[in-house]
Protein backbone atom coordinates (compact mmCIF):
# COMPACT_ATOMS: atom_id res chain seq x y z
CA UNK A 1 0.00 0.00 0.00
CA UNK A 2 2.85 2.42 0.86
CA UNK A 3 4.51 1.77 -2.50
CA UNK A 4 1.33 2.59 -4.39
CA UNK A 5 0.86 5.80 -2.40
CA UNK A 6 4.49 6.83 -2.94
CA UNK A 7 4.28 6.09 -6.68
CA UNK A 8 1.06 8.09 -6.98
CA UNK A 9 2.52 11.11 -5.19
CA UNK A 10 5.68 10.94 -7.31
CA UNK A 11 3.70 10.80 -10.56
CA UNK A 12 1.45 13.68 -9.50
CA UNK A 13 4.48 15.82 -8.70
CA UNK A 14 6.08 15.09 -12.06
CA UNK A 15 2.90 15.76 -14.04
CA UNK A 16 2.20 18.97 -12.11
CA UNK A 17 5.60 20.33 -13.11
CA UNK A 18 5.49 19.18 -16.74
CA UNK A 19 5.08 21.92 -19.33
CA UNK A 20 1.56 22.40 -20.57
CA UNK A 21 1.17 20.93 -24.11
CA UNK A 22 -0.93 23.87 -25.31
CA UNK A 23 1.46 26.54 -24.07
CA UNK A 24 3.19 28.20 -27.00
CA UNK A 25 6.74 29.09 -26.20
CA UNK A 26 9.64 30.25 -28.26
CA UNK A 27 12.18 29.30 -25.63
CA UNK A 28 14.10 26.05 -26.13
CA UNK A 29 13.77 23.31 -23.53
CA UNK A 30 16.44 23.45 -20.84
CA UNK A 31 19.58 21.65 -21.88
CA UNK A 32 20.56 18.55 -19.97
CA UNK A 33 24.16 18.96 -21.09
CA UNK A 34 26.31 20.86 -18.62
CA UNK A 35 27.41 24.29 -19.77
CA UNK A 36 31.12 24.76 -20.34
CA UNK A 37 31.59 27.25 -17.52
CA UNK A 38 29.47 25.38 -14.95
CA UNK A 39 32.32 23.08 -13.98
CA UNK A 40 33.71 25.85 -11.79
CA UNK A 41 30.40 26.47 -9.99
CA UNK A 42 31.26 27.12 -6.37
CA UNK A 43 29.44 24.92 -3.90
CA UNK A 44 27.99 26.64 -0.86
CA UNK A 45 29.56 25.81 2.46
CA UNK A 46 27.62 26.02 5.69
CA UNK A 47 24.97 28.74 6.02
CA UNK A 48 26.12 32.04 7.49
CA UNK A 49 26.46 32.06 11.26
CA UNK A 50 24.27 35.15 11.65
CA UNK A 51 21.50 35.04 9.03
CA UNK A 52 20.34 38.36 7.66
CA UNK A 53 17.17 39.29 5.83
CA UNK A 54 16.99 38.30 2.16
CA UNK A 55 17.77 41.22 -0.14
CA UNK A 56 15.30 42.56 -2.69
CA UNK A 57 18.14 42.40 -5.24
CA UNK A 58 18.16 38.59 -4.83
CA UNK A 59 14.36 38.49 -5.20
CA UNK A 60 14.57 40.71 -8.31
CA UNK A 61 17.18 38.33 -9.77
CA UNK A 62 14.87 35.35 -9.19
CA UNK A 63 11.99 37.19 -10.89
CA UNK A 64 14.21 38.14 -13.84
CA UNK A 65 15.37 34.54 -14.29
CA UNK A 66 11.73 33.39 -14.18
CA UNK A 67 11.02 35.88 -16.99
CA UNK A 68 14.11 34.72 -18.96
CA UNK A 69 15.61 38.23 -18.65
CA UNK A 70 19.34 37.57 -18.31
CA UNK A 71 20.35 41.25 -18.42
CA UNK A 72 18.07 42.22 -15.52
CA UNK A 73 19.13 39.10 -13.57
CA UNK A 74 22.81 40.01 -14.11
CA UNK A 75 22.22 43.57 -12.88
CA UNK A 76 20.30 42.38 -9.80
CA UNK A 77 22.91 39.75 -8.95
CA UNK A 78 25.71 42.30 -9.34
CA UNK A 79 23.88 44.70 -7.00
CA UNK A 80 23.30 41.85 -4.54
CA UNK A 81 27.00 40.96 -4.60
CA UNK A 82 27.96 44.59 -3.93
CA UNK A 83 25.73 44.79 -0.85
CA UNK A 84 26.81 41.38 0.48
CA UNK A 85 29.92 39.97 2.11
CA UNK A 86 31.70 36.63 2.35
CA UNK A 87 30.23 33.55 0.75
CA UNK A 88 26.99 35.23 -0.36
CA UNK A 89 28.99 37.93 -2.15
CA UNK A 90 31.15 35.33 -3.93
CA UNK A 91 28.16 33.21 -4.98
CA UNK A 92 26.16 36.23 -6.21
CA UNK A 93 29.12 37.54 -8.20
CA UNK A 94 29.79 34.08 -9.68
CA UNK A 95 26.18 33.94 -10.89
CA UNK A 96 26.36 37.48 -12.30
CA UNK A 97 29.61 36.73 -14.14
CA UNK A 98 28.25 33.89 -16.28
CA UNK A 99 27.91 34.18 -20.03
CA UNK A 100 24.64 32.33 -20.53
CA UNK A 101 21.36 31.95 -18.70
CA UNK A 102 21.73 28.18 -18.13
CA UNK A 103 25.01 28.71 -16.27
CA UNK A 104 23.50 31.65 -14.38
CA UNK A 105 20.62 29.45 -13.23
CA UNK A 106 23.00 26.74 -12.04
CA UNK A 107 25.01 29.26 -10.02
CA UNK A 108 21.78 30.84 -8.77
CA UNK A 109 20.94 27.42 -7.30
CA UNK A 110 24.20 27.46 -5.28
CA UNK A 111 23.43 31.02 -4.12
CA UNK A 112 19.86 30.08 -3.21
CA UNK A 113 21.04 27.18 -1.05
CA UNK A 114 22.53 29.81 1.27
CA UNK A 115 19.93 32.56 0.85
CA UNK A 116 16.99 30.27 1.68
CA UNK A 117 18.44 29.88 5.20
CA UNK A 118 18.19 33.63 5.85
CA UNK A 119 15.34 35.57 7.43
CA UNK A 120 12.57 36.23 4.89
CA UNK A 121 10.85 39.58 4.38
CA UNK A 122 7.14 39.66 5.23
CA UNK A 123 5.02 38.21 2.43
CA UNK A 124 7.87 36.10 1.00
CA UNK A 125 8.43 32.36 1.15
CA UNK A 126 10.82 29.61 0.12
CA UNK A 127 9.67 27.77 -3.00
CA UNK A 128 10.91 24.41 -4.27
CA UNK A 129 11.11 22.85 -7.74
CA UNK A 130 11.57 19.07 -7.53
CA UNK A 131 12.71 18.78 -11.15
CA UNK A 132 15.70 21.14 -11.47
CA UNK A 133 18.99 19.34 -10.76
CA UNK A 134 17.65 17.06 -8.02
CA UNK A 135 15.45 19.72 -6.45
CA UNK A 136 16.10 23.44 -6.05
CA UNK A 137 14.89 26.17 -3.70
CA UNK A 138 14.52 29.92 -4.08
CA UNK A 139 12.81 32.86 -2.33
CA UNK A 140 9.93 34.75 -3.92
CA UNK A 141 6.76 36.65 -3.06
CA UNK A 142 4.17 34.23 -1.75
CA UNK A 143 1.58 34.42 -4.52
CA UNK A 144 1.88 32.23 -7.60
CA UNK A 145 5.02 30.25 -8.43
CA UNK A 146 7.48 31.87 -10.85
CA UNK A 147 10.24 29.30 -11.38
CA UNK A 148 13.66 30.92 -11.96
CA UNK A 149 15.29 27.64 -13.00
CA UNK A 150 13.08 26.88 -16.00
CA UNK A 151 11.77 30.35 -16.77
CA UNK A 152 8.94 30.55 -19.26
CA UNK A 153 9.26 26.89 -20.33
CA UNK A 154 7.97 25.64 -16.95
CA UNK A 155 6.89 28.84 -15.23
CA UNK A 156 4.73 27.24 -12.53
CA UNK A 157 6.80 24.17 -11.63
CA UNK A 158 7.20 24.09 -7.89
CA UNK A 159 5.44 24.78 -4.64
CA UNK A 160 5.93 26.79 -1.47
CA UNK A 161 7.55 24.89 1.37
CA UNK A 162 7.11 27.43 4.17
Image (spheres, rainbow, N blue to C red):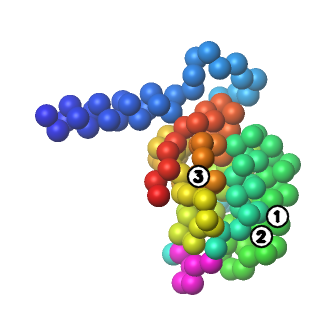
Question: Is 145 part of what is drawn in magenta?
Answer: no
Residue identified by numbered label 2? 81
> As drawn, is 142 to the left or to the right of 79?
left
Q: How many marks?
A: 3
Q: Judge whether residue 33 can be spotted in this image.
A: no
Q: Is residue 41 visible?
A: yes
The image position of residue 162, as x and y in percent, is 47, 58
Instruction: Locate the N terminus by quadrant.
Output: top left
Q: Seen from this angle, which residue lies furthest top?
A: 22
Between the residue at mark 2 and the residue at mark 1, the CA separation in whole angstroms equals 5 Å
Residue position for label 1: 78
Q: Which residue is mark 3?
A: 142
**Chain-order first, disc 1 or disc 3:** 1
Q: Nearer the viewer, mark 1 or mark 3?
A: 3
- The answer for how far apart the CA atoms under marks 1 and 3 are is 24 Å
Q: Bounds of the magenta span?
A: 47-52
Amino acid sequence: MNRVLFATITLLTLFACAPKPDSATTEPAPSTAPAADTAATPEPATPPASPTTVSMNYIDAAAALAADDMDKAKASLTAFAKESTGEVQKLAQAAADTGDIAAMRERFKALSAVVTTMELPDGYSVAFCPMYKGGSKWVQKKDSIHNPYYGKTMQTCGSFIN
